Image (spheres, grey):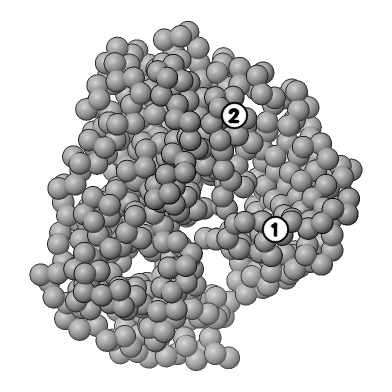
Amino acid sequence: MRYRQLYDQWNNYTDLESIWKENLQFIAKDEKQIEDAFYRDLEFGTGGMRGEIGAGTNRINTYTVRKATTGLASYIKGAGAEAMERGVVIAYDSRRFSPEFAREAANTLASNGIKAYLYMEPRTTPQLSFSVRHLNAFMGIVITASHNPPDYNGYKVYGEDGAQLNLADAEVVIEHVNDAGDALHIDQRNPDKELIIQLDGQLDQAYMDALKTVQENEEFATSSDLKVVFTPLHGASGTTVQHILNEVGYNHIYYVEEQMEPDGEFPTVESPNPEEQSAFEYAILHGEKNDADLLIAVDPDGDRVGIAVKATSGYKLLTGNQTGAILIEYLLSQLKEKGNIPANGRVFKTIVTSDLGRVITEYYGVSTEDVLTGFKFIGEKIKQYEETKEFQFLFGYEESYGYLIKDFARDKDAVQSVLAIVEAAAYYKKQGMTILQVLAQLYERHGYYLEGLQSVTKKGVSGVNAIQNLLKQLRTNTITEIAGISVLSQEDYLHSERTFTDGRETEEIFLPKSNVIKYFLADGSWVCVRPSGTEPKIKYYYGVLSGSEAESSEKLKALQDDFSLKMNQYLID
């Protein structure tokens, strides 16, 4: 068994760092854990890599980070001396081993003659994106696993435009990483320390100045009586958010002090994920204590944000789609009021994001473009239209709580989003309205859009096979109805084709290939199947539309119950 051979190779490696040696001893009698740690190399995909922390080829550790960075260095050297001189910006969040993995990446680059700008304290992912652009660096790396559990970490790669690496370049980097050789035996020469430039607070103010351009109505900050509670959930965004809200002048911001310090153990939360109710436990306590109007939680690397709004009883959490709709409504309404909506303005959303955003943009005479799931595809479109001038970026978002208002960063930016959300709430409070009342008006105007998400976790070798089997079966067995509603068409993004049940000719889909299938139903509902790119999960996304909350809720439940039952017959280990 190859995984056993690899375990023995690592276990017998005399120079193995003690922390990983101890980890191997800990799992020595657990055959399943040994197999999972060594049955494959941790996949370096189009967004980088993410996995459980530990010893092994299928874990993130000093050696797999070194291998990934060696491959990246090979790619950079192939781009020439100028690329090496422009270098790579490296940032990290509050997770376990994030500083160590960041230093390992910097040392590996410097060993290969490549300049590395290394943040010395936790910084957000969007600030990394901004820093790549500000320093005119050739690439960027951020060490983060977003909102995954504490035993995960990751390694994300950015291009010179500050966006996650595009598919074409990512494929070349992947080849270099795969060719880097055995992770244990990569030559790590003494790095040229002069090539490692430490970043402390040098770029913080430049990022702050850029953030201020997000404001549509600067005067609201100092005049508003809006009360806000903020938590970074032990992540990297706390200091940055506190500074920007202080600088622009908001006076009634309350911080969840128990969660302000970066801490990769996330000791006060079940999960550092602002999509989940449990992440707001402390924020709700502070909100009740201070009679706050709005609660805001940001994930560990500062790119996703969730909000809860004071309701008649307690606080109501908004979904990512609902927060996106509020931001679009506020931003476009303000541009319209000032006569500043560009004729070629465009909003971007992903294929699993609510269509409510689309109808709001159409109401303001703005077009919307769908991209594949993943903010890298929004970043790619920003760059494309920046060059062609065909469209002007106005806003980009995805249902998983990621938003971008200004493109000085090219990834979702929770700090920008916090500033915009607080301003929107302050504006509507001056109008005598809450965020919930604005949302109700949007539903009344455009229809009651409701979305849902189901995730099924399938770990290990058998789990990978089960997920692949499900997608294979969906392509073999055509689904004609879901919950008694006819399927009108199916979009298969892996094969780039749209097929129809009424016999119409198949159409081509002009999006990058991705292992995703989406069904469109006769009543306007849709269902999408997509394997997670960062976790061992298969995800089912749903969208429905009706004239009332009750009807939409009933529709959504029926779709979820029937479709998940259909999928269970295929999801076999």
Q: Which residue is mark 1?
A: 508
The picture places residue 91, in percent across and down from the top left corner, at 28, 56
The quarter of the picture where residue 193 lies is bottom left
The crowd level at tag 1 (other Cα within 10 Å; few <14, some 14-19, many 20+) is some
* Rendered image: mark on residue 362: 2
Would residue 65 be found to the left or right of residue 564 on screen? left
Q: Quadrant of the N terminus?
A: bottom right
- The residue closer to the viewer here, 253 or 108, is 108
The type of residue carrying mark 1 is: Glu
- The residue closer to the viewer here, 373 or 367, is 367
Q: Does 424 sit above or below residue 133?
A: above
Q: Secondary structure at mark 1?
A: strand
Identify which residue is drawn at 29% across, 35% down: 211
The type of residue carrying mark 2 is: Glu
Q: Does 1 sit above or below residue 150?
A: below
Would residue 371 be found to the left or right of residue 263 on screen? right
The quarter of the picture where residue 414 lies is top left
Give the mark, 2 or 1, whose residue is nearer the N terminus. Answer: 2
Identify which residue is drawn at 23% across, 78% down: 112
